[in-house]
Amino acid sequence: MPQANPTRQANRMPRRVDGVDAARGLALIGMFVAHVAPVVASVEVTQLLSIAEERPRLLFALTAGIGLGFISGGAAPITEGRDTLRRQIAIRAVILIVLGFLIWALLNPLVFIILDVYGVAFLIMLPLLFLRPWVALALGVGLVVIAPGLAELGARTEFVQAVRQTPVKFLSDWVVGGAYPVIVWVPVMLIGLALARLDLARARVLAAAALIGSLAAAVFLPIAASMPGPEVVSEASWSVPLHESIMTVGNVGVCVVVVAALVAVTALARPPVRRVARTLLSPIIAMGAMPLSIYTIHLVVIAGAKRTENGVVTDDSWPLLIGLVVGSMVFAWLWRRYVGRGPLEQVLRWASGRDRADAATAPEAR
């Protein structure tokens, strides 16, 4: 086996990457806002809250791809035990799919559930896991440009509409029709995988990612904002799928910038800056280190908060939103400090056989 580059080896990220966990924690908070923030009269506040509608989903997908890159060796992909690793990821994916269905059947929260789609996306990523970084990046970027528009067009077809009226409507939701279609998630995960392979420990990689992400956001988001939305034009108009693709490219750019900035400030900045950043972000980092636990607990909470107002079933509430954010931070910070890995993360690790894996040759997932 060829020897690893000593410079590259020295720059390898630690077992947990606080910046990536912080980004995932921010995605969780954004999801809380999207799920339970009440409707407000202020246009400015509404526009601010609308940020949480799409970007947290994409940030989840991006960090999921980065996590797959880390678990498979990061910038130095593992060469031994690949089949074992794929089997472990597949087991996790199946568990996530089952858990998603159980939550839907038992709790039926008033939100789309990401767990089953997450699992399906992981299964699709298995044969793509060891693509060369530039191939993964090119494939991911190319598909991000066209996939959102294709998903929008696919969701309008008579076939998809017919499937959505049957008990297997989840199949169409997985692919194109739901809030988290894998046709969009997988390309974003490929971009995250490529970032992990290119090595997030390298300042040059972070700088390039931040620059390209900033350009994508600066160019495509204003274009998307200037286009008429579906509430103005016909749903059959070609501009709706085009708007979806342009908006997604810009939002992915924002997500890349967020990850690059958080990794830079928590890992590559001067020691005093790193210490301050990690301290201030520690509750959010703790949330992002146990996303499955925090996400599942939040579904239980909002399912229990359902009520009927003026004949409409809702769970929206400012006290609930504040309670979810603050409660999740406190719980995650205390659990991580005094217990360690998140409760459901530990169960998932045990069930997939990761506890029996050699940590030296297969670093744990982020």
Image (cartoon, helix red, strand yellow):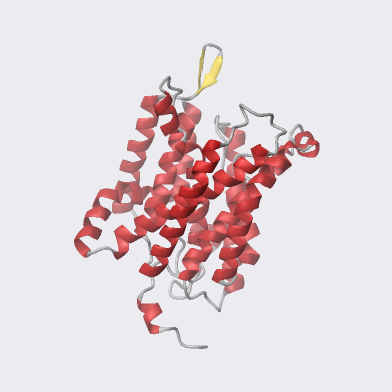
Looking at the image, residue 237 lies above or below residue 347: above
Q: State the residue at coordinates (19%, 60%).
A: 272
Q: Which residue is located at x 27 percent, y 63 percent?
A: 269
Where residue 243 sits, quadrant-wise, is: top right
Q: Is residue 188 left or right of residue 198?
A: right
Report the front residue among 255 and 197.
255
Residue that extends furthest to the bottom in the rendered view of this protein: 2
Frontmost residue, 37 versus 88: 37
Q: How many marks?
A: 0
As rendered, which of 297 and 199 lies closer to the eye? 199
Q: Where is residue 132 drawn, in percent x and y? A: 57, 72
Give the camera-side residue of 111 and 339.
Answer: 111
Residue 291 can be seen in this image: yes
Answer with the quarter of the image where residue 240 lies: top right
Q: In the rendered image, is residue 346 in sight?
A: no
- The location of residue 212, given as percent across then percent down, is 46, 59
Location of residue 263 (image quadrant): bottom left
Q: Quadrant of the C terminus?
A: bottom left
Residue 294 in the image, given as x and y percentages of width and height = 43, 43
Q: Is residue 147 above or below residue 319?
A: below
In the displayed orientation, state which residue is furthest to the left: 272
Query: x%, y% of residue 63?
Result: 47, 55
The residue most toward the top is: 310
On screen, residue 104 versus residue 168, left or right, reads left
Kindly identify the residue that appears in the image at 54 percent across and 36 percent down: 226
Which residue is located at x 64 percent, y 43 percent? 242
Q: Is residue 117 above or below residue 5?
A: above
